[in-house]
Image: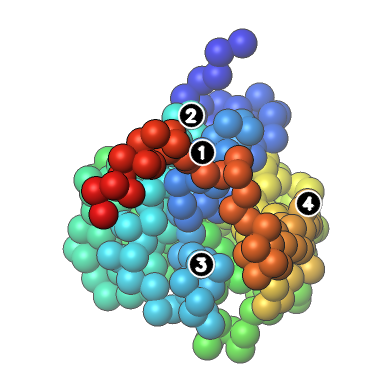
Amino acid sequence: MERKKMTVPEIQAKAARGEKLLMLTSYDYPLALLADRAGIDILLVGDSVGMTTLGYETTLPVTMDEMIHHAKAVRRGVQYALCIGDMPFMSYQTSIAEAVYNAGRFLKEASMEAVKLEGGVEMAETVRAIVNTGIPVMGHIGLTPQSINRLGGFKTQGRDAATAKQLLDDAAALEQAGAFAVLLEAIPDRVAQLIYERAGIPIIGIGAGPHCHGQLLIVHDLLGLFEKFTPRFAKRYANLSEVIGKAFADYKQEVEAGTFPGPEHCWTIKDDELAKLKAML
């Protein structure tokens, strides 16, 4: 069966049919190509690129130009998935006008099809303004990594009634502002279930339990490529760090031993041509 190009309406229709949405982060062409071939519905060019790929300690240093650079690479590898650009820190918090401009950069310069930004009630007017320009927006509440200094680190959110109620209010505000979906990060599963049951738009979880329309994982966590820490909610489906480390070690050993390159890795020249060459010297 021929695959459909995933669009915002198709994402919403799939959720309405009760089919699970598949979402991964993506930061480069090769992995975007593989994820798209595997049938992933949504690829998020996340500002987590700062930690997984650029070596920053947090997502805070990531710039719009860095995000655009990686978003362009991802888009070149995608045929079917919906591509979302993640608004980095200080690209949308200073003013609504700047938020709209930077959201537009993702579409104009990197051919993204939507953007994601962090925040709930306090970001509702910004979301509304971006949506009103024709740019789809995914909201993001719960553990919002751009706010780790206020949150005191990468901590689960909504574990008491008051903060859980705020998360429900945040989700409702984002939906009312026109967000086409909301991402819930690191919140209790029963709180996520309450949001899911009340929402009229797709709810996607990352560390929010099974009661969501879909799930997101950081691709480097899934593949075992990020070793600084592994969140409790992440499942490692492969350990590519071990595989890649062994490949590098084998390469080192063979070069040092003189067994690579072998004859099968070389081009040759006919004996008569080699003789002519030597005669020219």
Q: What residue type is labelled 4?
A: Tyr
Label 3 SS: loop
Q: In which quarter of the image is residue 143?
A: bottom right
Instruction: Find disc 4 in the rendering and name its residue.
Output: 237
Please state the horizontal and vertical placement of residue 190, each as a whole percent of the image: 80, 58
Q: Which residue is drawn at 56% across and 64% down?
A: 141
Q: How far apart are marks 2 and 1 (CA)?
A: 10 Å
Which numbered marker is on residue 53?
A: 3
Do the residues bearing badges 4 and 3 touch, measured as CB atoms within 8 Å?
no
Q: Which residue is drawn at 51% across and 67% down?
A: 53
Q: Which residue is drawn at 37% across and 41% down?
A: 275
- Give the mark toward the camera: 2 or 3: 3
Q: How far apart are marks 4 and 3 (CA)?
A: 19 Å
| Left or right, 47 with reference to 258 | left
Packing grade of label 3 (10 A; few <14, some 14-19, many >=20) is some
Q: Can residue 177 be seen in this view?
A: no
Please state the horizontal and vertical placement of residue 220, each as a whole percent of the image: 63, 60
Question: Which of the two discs, 1 and 3, labels the residue nearer the N terminus?
Answer: 1
Q: Distance between the residues labelled 2 and 3?
A: 24 Å
Question: Which of the two discs, 2 and 3, labels the residue nearer the N terminus?
Answer: 3
Packing grade of label 2 (10 A; few <14, some 14-19, many >=20) is many
Which numbered marker is on residue 80?
A: 2
Q: Residue at x 52, y 44 (%)?
A: 266
Which numbered marker is on residue 33?
A: 1
Quadrant the N terminus occupies: top right
Label 1 SS: helix
Do the residues bearing badges 1 and 4 touch, measured as CB atoms within 8 Å?
no
